[in-house]
Image: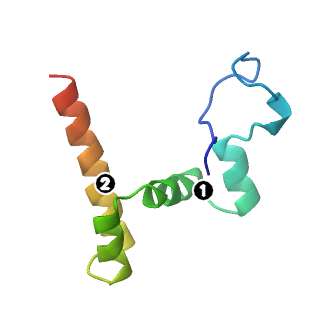
Amino acid sequence: MYGIQNGGDRKSESVPNKSDVIFQNELAKQMGMSVDTLSNYKLLSEMIPELEELLDTGVVTKTTALAIMMNSKRNMRFFTHT
């Protein structure tokens, strides 16, 4: 799911080949899922190995892993903006 952009305008010159750009809402529709579900899968694909192992062994669920990751991102934003 690399290269997926959320929103933006299609006239941007930073995109070399505009016909190759697919946005999250378009991809989610093609895959038959919501944008939120697609975003959750993207987040899960970026988790740290330790959390991935806990998920793989059943110690935590996908929902718990996502909650941990979202909480970590909120904390990082808080500490980098203070």
Residue identifier under label 2: 69
Left or right? Give the position of 30 relative to 79: right
Q: Which disc number belongs to residue 68?
A: none
**Quarter-wise, where is residue 13 in the image?**
top right
Type of colouring: rainbow
Q: Camera-side residue: 45 or 36?
A: 45
Residue that extends furthest to the front in the rendered view of this protein: 49
Q: How far apart, in angstroms, are the residues tagged by discs 1 and 2?
A: 20 Å
Q: Secondary structure at mark 1?
A: loop
Left or right? Give the position of 19 relative to 81: right
Q: Camera-side residue: 55 or 32?
A: 55
Q: Camera-side residue: 2 or 61?
A: 2
Residue identifier under label 1: 34
Amino acid type, callout 1: Ser
Callout 1 touching callout 2 (CB < 8 Å): no
Q: Position of residue 23 (x, y in %)?
A: 68, 40
Residue 58 drawn above or below residue 66: below
Left or right? Give the position of 72 relative to 25: left
Amino acid type, callout 2: Met
